[in-house]
Image (cartoon, rainbow, N blue to C red):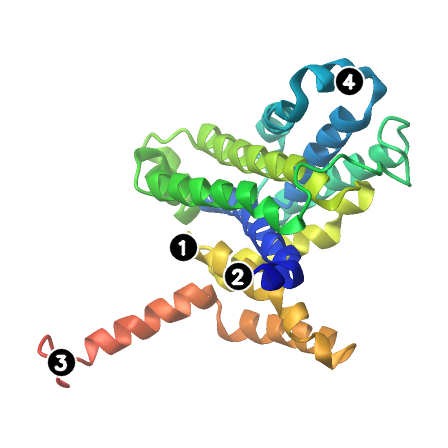
Amino acid sequence: MEGFLQNYGFLLVTLLQQSLLAFSLYFPLMAGQLSLASPGFYALGGYIAAIMSTAPECTPLREKLGTGIYPLEWLAAGLISGVLALVIGISALRLRGIYLALATIAFVEILRVICLNLEITGGAIGIFDIPQLFAERWSYGLIFGPLLLLTLLFVYRLENSRTGRALKAIREDELAAGAMGIHTTYYKVLAFVIGAVLAGIVGAMSAPFLNTWNARQGTFDASISYLAYVLIGGSRSMWGPLLGAVLLASLPELLRPLKDARLIINGMVLVVASIYLPQGIVGALGRLKRCVVKNTSPMGGER
């Protein structure tokens, strides 16, 4: 078991991390908002943790709290990401569709350029030698795993609550939802903020896991990857982001023996899934289940 964790521990933790980032994009999509801002908040959370762990100004705090500095970093990253998302969301979420996507992409790029030119963020080089929380990389599953379980529980409770029903109503028809008395702007901003807080916390947890942090952590490419996780897995089910992230994040590793050809196969999988699985893998499995139930009698025989 120890050998397995030594060989595949980094991959397993990465799957947990990517699943959480997929959920950070899933929350705005619950309200029908195509937001690609998650990598920006992820990068912001990582920078907050990296600065608090390495800046000389934070040395007295680190000496006083010891390992307690890490939960404080997660809290600070979540709060700052949430406040920034609230400020951005109030104005940006008035946009819809591709215009919102462009606005959130602009936010990611603006934040990346700012971090490239600030001394406190290490500029283009970034921040190195971030103190690690655990000696072994696979041990980071002890923080990413529980966070993923809490996220799944939160999503389950949210989808079955009044807020979740309001988000789904907005996703299906925003004008009709507004006519029914649902405060559409409030719920869209709420979903956006929840996703930003989760991305910020994941970023703060990822900084010591990766041991280094730079502007490449939050890019447009990352936005597309997170979006692919949700769309390929299924954007109408809480299991979609989890399934999509596990499949797409592990696929390059599974195809590693094929060397450069694995990139072509990875791209083909995305294209084929986008064409033939418009509702994602979870949606296709749901249709298959309904077909089986429809053609089978309660006693197990065919109708």
Query: Which numbered disc, 1 or 2, marks the residue that appears first in the sequence?
Result: 1
- Disc 4 is placed on an element classified as helix
The residue that appears at 65% across and 59% down in the rendered structure is 6
| Callout 1 secondary element | loop
Q: Residue at x 40, y 49 (%)?
A: 172
- Give the number of the mark in front: 1 or 3: 3
Label 2 residue SS: helix
Query: Residue 300, which numbered label?
Result: 3
Residue located beneath label 1 in the image: 237
- Measure the alpha-carbon separation of dots 4 and 2: 39 Å
Residue 18 drawn at (x, y percent): 60, 52
Instruction: Tell me the amino acid under the disc marked 1.
Output: Ser
Q: Amino acid at mark 4?
A: Cys
Decide if residue 249 is in sight here: no
Q: In the image, 90: left or right of 114?
A: left
Q: Looking at this rendering, what residue extends furthest in the bottom direction?
A: 302
Q: CA distance from mark 1 to mark 3?
A: 28 Å
Mark 2: few/some/many CA within 10 Å (<14, 14-19, 20+): many
Neighbour class for label 3 at 10 Å: few (<14), some, many (≥20)?
few
220 sits left or right of 4 in the view: right
Cα–Cα span, label 3 and label 4: 66 Å
Three-letter code for the amino acid on which mark 2 is drawn: Gly
Instruction: Report crowding for label 4: few under 14, some 14 to 19, many 20 or more residues within 10 A (C-alpha).
Output: few
Please name the residue that numbered disc 4 is placed on: 58
The N terminus lies in quadrant: bottom right
Please report contact status of discs 2 and 3: CB closer than 8 Å, yes or no.
no
Residue bearing mark 2:
244
